[in-house]
Image (cartoon, helix red, strand yellow):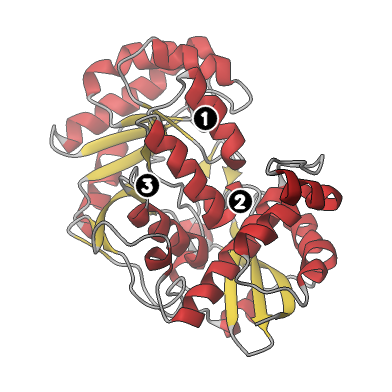
Amino acid sequence: MKIRSVQATWVHVPIPEAQQHVSDFGRIASFDATLVRIETECGLVGWGEAKEEVGSAGNNHGLTALLNHKFGPALIGQDPRDINRIWEVLYNGVRDHYALAHGHVFPILGRRGISVSAIGGIDMALWDILGKSLNAPVWRLLGGRRASAMPAYASGGWADADGIGEQLLSYVRRGGFKAVKMRVGVVDGAVRHSVARVRAARAALGPDIGLMCDAHGTYTVAEARQFCRLVEDCDLMWFEEPVTADDHRGLAEVRAGTSVPIAIGESEFTRHDFLDVASRGGADVFQPDLAICGGISEAMRIGAIASAFNIRLAPHLWTGALAFAAGLHVTAACPAGWVLEYSLGANPLLHELARERFTVVDGMLEIPDRPGLGVTVDEDFVRRWAVPAP
């Protein structure tokens, strides 16, 4: 089995104005991703998804060009089943022969950002091919799933203090969710305004629905500690990205000063970033985004670190259908896997890219048993929203 072609496509899908939301990232007017299609000489096709940032932000032009003009051509003629070898070759670049011979990394200098995102998109597609070649779901190849369905939480929550309760309750009604997540942070202005929104949310939800808060890394250490102190009686499941991902020391300070569990991960790349957080005692929950952190292979390594440090794994799944499915497989297979994110913002790449549907019933999401990622890509949808290749 050999790789015949690698094609990356940037899809840019506009979101109708009535369905757009505004956060510290601005108005989310589109959903973008770079899709990776790998075809073998025997006709098997695998799909992956790569991105550098969430929503409509991100350097998709550069990411797509990197895949089409550097990483993709280097894979032609290789065996797609050699997933670990290909990951190391791409991560280590011209020094890959040293890495393969010596058993430790000699990474390219640009070992984060679009380089790792591109590797993640390729990695997903290779696992998809491997599963299809063996007529087995990816979770089976990762060691088996721990359950046929896993709990999911509804992710959204941008309304003001007067509307946040009803907004979150509407999520609960839509899928029987037992937990919901809301946004806080710089977009609210003073910390006290975020605190007021959280208290309004908890009052509306009552004590039996889990509540998470996500600051998108926008607080200073002092602000994050103030926020935690003022909401400690709100029984939060976690406080996500309290400070910038560049400040692992400050993150550890926040966690050391509160009983509120701390979650991080969507802004981190590779196991090395997550190991540093774990070693500093900075998190209770890891949230790698498989389209950002390096794909399924790297997410399983991150999951192993999580398990070793008694940290829970709850991947960031504000993604398209491919990365979403990849996250389901990893969460189901990893011993640290806990709960699944389900975006309630407008997300056409989750709901329209694949012919299958991901439906939450009584707060639970089925782990698919179809071969590979279990996703049938609607290629007409891809062509309709494709940006001309760079």
Does any portion of residue 390 appear in the rendered image? no
What is the count of numbered marks? 3
Q: Secondary structure at mark 3?
A: strand
Q: Secondary structure at mark 2?
A: loop
x and y, in percent, of residue 53 in the image = 63, 47
Residue at the disc numbered 3: 155
User: Rounded to the nearest whole Å, what is the CA distance between mark 1 and mark 3?
Assistant: 17 Å
- Is residue 294 found left or right of 368 in the rendered image? right
Q: Label 2 is placed on what type of residue?
A: Gly
Q: Label 3 is placed on what type of residue?
A: Ser
x and y, in percent, of residue 207 in the image = 13, 32
x and y, in percent, of residue 274 in the image = 54, 33
User: Rounded to the nearest whole Å, what is the CA distance between mark 1 and mark 2?
Assistant: 30 Å
User: Rounded to the nearest whole Å, what is the CA distance between mark 3 and mark 2?
Assistant: 23 Å
Residue at the disc numbered 1: 187
Q: Residue furthest bottom?
A: 42
Residue at the disc numbered 2: 294
Q: Earlier in the sequence, mark 3 or mark 2?
A: 3
Q: Is residue 88 above or below residue 135?
A: above
